[in-house]
Image (cartoon, rainbow, N blue to C red):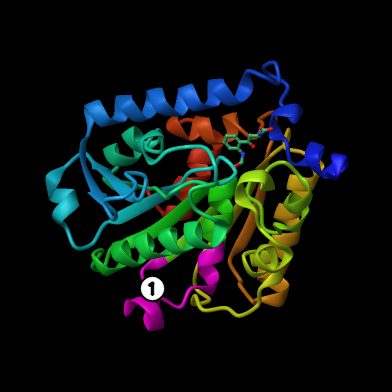
Amino acid sequence: MNSENQKQYSPSLWNKRLPVDQVVTAHGEYLAKNSDQARHKLLSHTFRFSDLDPEQSIEIMYSDPKAFSATENSNILNFNGGYWQWGSVSDSSFMSEHFCQKNVITVAVGYTIAPKACMSEIFCQVERAVAKILENSGKSEVFICGHSAGGHLASMLLFSDFKRIYHVDAFNLKGIISVSGIFDLRPLLETDINDNLKMDLEESRRLSPMLRSDLRLHKDVKFLIVYAQNDSPAFHKQSEDFKMHLSKSLGYENVKSIEIKDFDHFNIIENISRDDFILTKEIYKFMKVD
Ligand SMILES: N[C@@H](CC(=O)c1ccccc1NC=O)C(=O)O
């Protein structure tokens, strides 16, 4: 165990709002409550990809059946955080209400969490769900937002060969938003986060977008990399290093990073349930929604 890494990758220790042992529970309750509220107010469909685990599914929300059946609209996919071992697809539609009011369709994307699935399996499940969504999205624009572990999964899609493996075009995948994401998994090997994931060095390298340059996604994809002021220094560095990797090594032109002042690892994502939050407004701008 590396105690410095353990500290840097324990986001609850860096929050300044709540006692350390309460912040994760409060976070889970917030996401569940707001997702339930959205489910009651909006129309929704769940598609399950497996009989083995209900988490391997997507939950689509929308306010207007006409928008849902239109061939040209805007979709935002959400990948939940929780270090690939907590969180649920059913708690991942907490931001749907205001997006759907603006005729954006929201899609919570679920996956089997560790230790039932390892990191490679989790990424495959997410990749397959995205391929299905792209296949069925017509000319609609698709944006992906991921928090923490979800930001990692979203960024890994850069190296997905959708054409060869799933026979779909990814031309309508327009942008990726990582909120307090992790891009180099190696520091996690020496923390208790890996007790359930059981990654070895080879798997951690292969699944680190920071260490990959075998790009498959087209260069027009836009990136928004966001982190909270009260994230740890290691999280800040991971985001800024990945921004450099995208722009300098991989040649992406449209990459922006933002630090959200006075927020932490948890309330930075909770608050995208509000339409007046600074990050929500940035996401609207990024998606060209008004
Ligand atoms: N044990 C971690 C928990 C954590 O990082 C977390 C919990 C819920 C949702 C996202 C999280 N972070 C990354 O995926 C902590 O110290 O906060």
**Which residue is nearer to you in this view: 171 or 109?**
109
Identified by mark 1, the residue type is Ala
Q: Is residue 170 magenta?
A: yes
**Which residue is nearer to you in this view: 72 or 21?**
21
Taking 257 as reference, is 47 left or right?
left
Who's the residue at 58% across and 48% down the image?
149
Location of mark 1 (residue):
170
Who's the residue at 83% across and 44% down the image?
1
SS at badge 1:
loop
On the image, the x and y values in percent for residue 122 come to: 48, 56
Q: Residues within 10 Å of mark 1 (few under 14, many from 20)?
A: many
On the image, the x and y values in percent for residue 186 come to: 75, 58
**Which residue is nearer to you in this view: 54 or 73?**
54
State the image quarter where residue 274 is shown.
top left
**Which residue is nearer to you in this view: 189 or 108?**
189
On the image, the x and y values in percent for residue 174 come to: 43, 65
In the rendered image, is residue 275 in sight? no
Quadrant location of the C terminus? top left
Quadrant hosting ligand 1: top right
State the image quarter where residue 23 is shown.
top right
Q: Is residue 211 magenta?
A: no
Taking 282 as reference, is 91 left or right?
left
Q: Which residues are magenta?
A: 156-173
